[in-house]
Amino acid sequence: DARVTQTPRHKVTEMGQEVTMRCQPILGHNTVFWYRQTMMQGLELLAYFRNRAPLDDSGMPKDRFSAEMPDATLATLKIQPSEPRDSAVYFCASGWRQRQYNEQFFGPGTRLTVL
Amino acid sequence: RKEVEQDPGPFNVPEGATVAFNCTYSNSASQSFFWYRQDCRKEPKLLMSVYSSGNEDGRFTAQLNRASQYISLLIRDSKLSDSATYLCVVTIFTDKLIFGTGTRLQVFP
């Protein structure tokens, strides 16, 4: 049963610290997405990649956030420096481009708390 | 104005009831439409796609009205296990999914 995996599942850190979240997409999927979910804003797309190339990161605060795909099996999202307003659940999702049908499979999320 | 709007609920219904959720989207260029389900403290999962002709999957029926920019989800014979948040999702020309904030459903015995 192929799944998207994310680590860590929970992270508590202090303001100003660097946070790195990792995602392993489903093997064979060519598109990877990073989302952030908060009670107030719901699910927001931060960035996404196709075939490891960044396609859109317009939803991401550029000054402190960065997203990369060092290889096809790993996507990372970094926050440096972290701030309390970054506290949220961060989901990674993967999918494949198949005509107009673009189901995305979500990982379990990283629950981040910045104190 | 949000691109995808939903009534946040909660909708509290007894087992066996029929419940309907509505969703409106603002961009007439929206191409694809979905309902995702999210259980408490879990990740969203695709429930069903929504087609112009309407589609049904067991107890679930989805409808799309492009003229009114309106999507609906009908759940018949509600089960306790249907309790979750239902997310309305649209895409516009790209792979980007635009999520509504969700409608919470609570089914009670």
Image (spheres, rainbow, N blue to C red):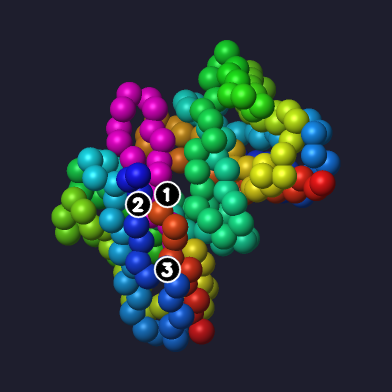
Q: Which residue is mark 3?
A: A9
Chain of residue at mark 3? A
Residue at image position (31%, 27%) is: A98
- Labels 1 & 2 near each other (Cβ < 8 A): yes
Chain of residue at mark 1? A
Q: Residues within 10 Å of mark 3 (few under 14, many from 20)?
A: some
Give left or right: position of A111 versus A81.
right
Residue B5 position in % (x across, y down): 65, 41
Residue B42 position in % (x across, y down): 53, 56
Q: Residues within 10 Å of mark 1 (few under 14, many from 20)?
A: many
| Tag of residue A4 | 2
Give left or right: position of A1 versus B34.
left
Amino acid at pointer 3? Arg
Locate the N terminus of chain B and report the quarter of the image it occupies: top right
| Tag of residue A106 | 1
Residue B76 in which image quadrant: top right
Amino acid at pointer 1? Phe
Please state the extent of the stretch shown in magenta in the rendering.
A90-106
Residue at image position (49%, 64%) is: A89
- Labels 3 & 2 near each other (Cβ < 8 A): no
Residue at image position (62%, 60%) is: A40
Which residue lies most toward the top here?
A: B53
Of residues B61 and A67, the one nearer the viewer is B61
Q: CA distance from mark 1 to mark 2?
A: 6 Å
| Tag of residue A83 | none
**Tags 1 and 3 both on a single chain:** yes
